[in-house]
Amino acid sequence: MTTVFTLPHTPPPALVRSRDTVGPALRAAVARLHPWPQRMAAYAFGWCDADGTPSAGGSGGKGVRQALAVLGAEAVGAPASDGVTAAVAVELVHAFSLVHDDIMDGDERRRHRESVWKAFGTGPAVLAGDALYALAVETLAGAGGAHTAAAVRELSGALGELVHGQADDLLFETRPWTGPEAVGAAEYRDMAVRKTGSLLSCALSLGPVLAGAAPGRAAALAEAGRQLGAAFQAVDDLLGIWGDPQVTGKPVHSDLLRGKKTLPVLTALASGTEAGHRLAGLLGGGPLPAVEAAGA
Ligand code: GRG
């Protein structure tokens, strides 16, 4: 297949701005971890190689959630420090979810390098994910101020949604491609809102909640994040098939080869077109055979 879908290479100003303020705070938070999970966390963020050597060119991800956290705080006039605290918490949770997701899916590459479990082993990677999760809650809870408990509740609610979405996504893999038990568009969307929208939603609303903004304003930002998350997941699915692996840092067609119920495949199957029929015939109602998929 040809790569036809790329992301802009010039990052938006909000991303660049947030990296300057959030980056040092994120490093300071990770430095509080036990040296072993600290090494794995620093590796996951692209700051060092697996042997601990500082790495200049590592990719710690695009930083979308940290930018949203800074923008969410700015949108309600919250102190910049609340935006940074929110950004650190959501980036830590995001990193945690990616480390554990790669273990669940057996994905060997992430962010242009070996995934954490591949580089350090599964047990250590589970521990690194747990450490990142605990650090996120500790960072937020340690923020002080009158609204910390509400912010911790907001983050915990998002984590629950994230788990719900991930559980749905994993269960989709056991469902047939076609027929009455097939995954429909509405179900896919609900899953995407939960799996991906929950953290984007939390990113936008967490700073405002921490600053004690009017609940209606935080809720409006949270809803915007949920919708953005559904769109973000759809783009992630498209990139999984047509993205340039040099840019995405993910192996070619890994979702397709695993028979994951991603949006392009579900849409093609539901289209009723010739291509959809051919795809349905290829999938045959069962898991996608790797050899056929590679030539599809
Ligand atoms: C958080 C309690 C808890 C459990 C985790 C493993 C899991 C449950 C959820 C996985 C959720 C997941 C991996 C969603 C994928 C969302 C997504 C599109 C990730 C890619 O985000 P990018 O493109 O990644 O922003 P970078 O690397 O740029 O940060």
Image (cartoon, grey):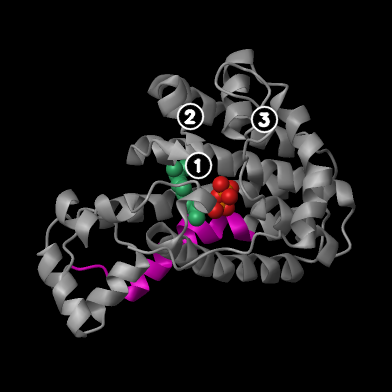
Q: CA distance from mark 1 to mark 3?
A: 18 Å
- Where the C terminus falls, by quadrant? bottom left
Q: Earlier in the sequence, mark 3 or mark 2?
A: 3
- Measured as percent of width and height from the top left, residue 143 is found at 80, 38
Marks 1, 3: nearer the viewer = 3
Q: Secondary structure at mark 1?
A: helix
Q: Amino acid at mark 3?
A: Trp
- Where the N terminus falls, by quadrant? bottom left
Residue visible at 19% across and 50% down in the picture:
290
- Measured as percent of width and height from the top left, residue 213 is found at 82, 62
Please report contact status of discs 1 and 3: CB closer than 8 Å, yes or no.
no
- Label 2 near ligand 1 (CB < 8 Å): no
Marks 3, 2: nearer the viewer = 3
Q: Amino acid at mark 2?
A: Val
- Label 1 near ligand 1 (CB < 8 Å): yes
Image position of 135 with respect to 231: above or below = above
Mark 1 sits on what residue?
A: 97
Q: Earlier in the sequence, mark 1 or mark 2?
A: 1
Q: Earlier in the sequence, mark 1 or mark 3?
A: 3
Mark 3 sits on what residue?
A: 47
Q: Residues within 10 Å of mark 2 (few under 14, many from 20)?
A: many
Mark 2 sits on what residue?
A: 116
Image position of 222 with respect to 206: above or below = below
Indicate which disc residue 8 carries.
Answer: none
Q: Residues within 10 Å of mark 3 (few under 14, many from 20)?
A: many
Q: Secondary structure at mark 2?
A: helix
Range shown magenta: 182-201
* The stretch drawn in magenta includes residue 9: no
Along the horizontal axis of the image, is 286 left or right of 101?
left
